[in-house]
Amino acid sequence: MDNPWWHSAVVYQIYPRSFADADGDGMGDLRGIIDHLDHIAGLGADVVWLSPVYPSPQDDNGYDISDYQDIEPVFGTLADFDELLAGVHERGMRLVMDLVVNHSSDEHQWFVESRSSKDSPKRDWYWWRPAREGMEPGTPGAEPTNWGSVFGGSAWEYDPASGEYFLHIFSRKQPDLNWENPEVRDAVYAMMNWWLDRGVDGFRMDVIDHISKDTTLPDGVVRPGAPYGEGGPHYLNGPRNHEFLQEMHRRVFAGRDALLTVGEMPGVTVDEAVLYTDPARKEVDMVFNFDHVWADRGADPWLLYPLRLTRLKAIFARWQAGLAETGWNSLYWNNHDQPRVVSRYGDDSPQWRERSAKMLGAVLHLHRGTPYVYQGEELGMTNYPFGSIADFRDIEALGHYAQAVDHEGRQPADVLTVLRARSRDNARTPMQWDDSPQAGFTTGTPWLAVNPNYKDINAVAAVADQESVYHFYRRLIALRHEEPAVVYGDFTMLLPQDERLYAYTRRFEGVELLVIGNFTGEPVRADIDEAGAWSAAELLLTNAPASADLVLEPWQVVIYRRGVTR
């Protein structure tokens, strides 16, 4: 069986500014990562994914890049990066860079030149448009379209010097690159090849399903009460997206061995993902979809909805079935844009935090696909107890708060309740290394406050405790490396209508695995076929004493293995 190496791999994501600070300035850096590579290698991870470390004004914490071929001085130097890359390789791991090419920073030289004049050779490297016909440029409603920005406000920024607007789907300091211009694509591909020639092992590509826009730029539908139209239908999975990624593959990845390419695609459907990840089409190896991390959302973004497990299971089942024959899934609960899963879908109380964190990890990792572990997830790190809007640093949280309170008339307390649960800053609090001041993250003042529970939840304590979340994740990763059924087994969802238990089987070449996770704080019996036979099968992994009749304790997970006739 000639399958790609990444089918059996596990990826560990590092958010550099929050991982480890070696120089005491309160911001994580490359030398801090170098100092902690053994922590990641000890977990068994195969790949390190590094969130952006390029020079940046840090308007969106590095996802606004002002130079694609250097290192942000706060993080270190290119020499530090080369040392980090060598350290990753020496430990038998690979390094994947985060790549943000839907947009650049407005301080990138490309945009500085583009903005300098309507006659600039780089004017068409970005999306510049005049005011709406008949409207005075710079006045409300004169924007070329009614699209809203992801971060709040209009998606268009007026430039008084030229009298035109530029498009920014995200921050006004993140102007969208015009991929219709072949010179833009040439420059992006040259930059990507430069990093691969340096030894990088691939890219995770940020919002890469945004790069092709409907060039007519039509207005979007305005939902009741919404201040702006929905631009998404006109830039998500646009008309030339597949063409651009196939061209990228030919110009950058073809002929290179052992690379990993991942596309973050917030609006992707299962059918589109099959096309993006079909090896024969040569686009990307896998995509990040958002369906499962939107499972607890409803029509009103400022209301918290309880998770319906049946909805979550239906989403996973749809993606497992859809990519069963062609393509490949990525598996994640956490990343730098999501709140901590143990606080979101588990129970972060002292009684159940560790057990529910283990259950969530096992239920996810035993699916078919490549699992991603976000820094601190292996410790069971939790959401932060934010007290007021002043505690937040994320541009998205601050923008949404202003939009909701100042323009939509929402109550500040109601908005804060949602931000506490959902903000990206929950994922960005500093990594908790030990029980010393600032959790061992820095000797200075951290850029974002350390979670006060660090004295109980930290890496030193976890590594010393064989029953910790860390060691449970280590066993999960080892199981993926050792048991082919975890990687290649077919997937069958059990109990799809059960709101308490998440159960499924994986079957491959005479081996069948059963996974059951209890998503509640109460004991629950698993009413499945052959329950007695399964309870007598080999128990591979659990986080609580297993019963003889498949009664799962609160937040328990069990993984059984048995031989079957092919």
Image: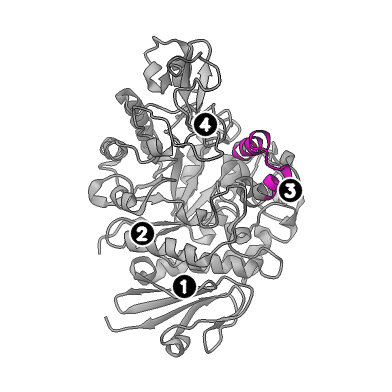
Classify mark 3: helix, strand or loop.
Answer: helix
Bounds of the magenta segment = 396-417
Ranked by sequence position, the earlier of labels 3 and 2 is: 2
Marks 1 and 4, Cα distance to the nearest angstrom? Answer: 43 Å
Q: Amino acid at mark 3?
A: Gln
Q: From the viewer's perspective, is the residue at label 2 or at label 1 nearer?
A: 1
Q: Position of residue 278 (x, y in %)?
A: 27, 52
- Work out whether residue 75 can be spotted: yes
Q: Which residue is mark 2?
A: 7
In the rendered view, tell whether residue 512 sits above or below residue 275.
below
Mark 2 and mark 1 lie on one chain; the one further toward the N terminus is 2
Which label lies toward us, 3 or 1? 1
> Taking 182 as reference, is 486 above or below it?
below
In what element is the residue under mark 2? helix
Dot 1 corresponds to which residue?
497
Marks 2 and 1 sit apart, C-alpha to C-alpha, by 30 Å
Side of 184 relative to 398 (left or right): left
In percent of the image, x 48 and y 38: which residue is there? 82
As shown in the figure, which amino acid type bears the numbered disc 4?
Asp
Comparing marks 3 and 4, which lies closer to the viewer?
4
Residue type (three-letter) at the residue carrying disc 2: His
On the image, the x and y values in percent for residue 489 come to: 34, 70
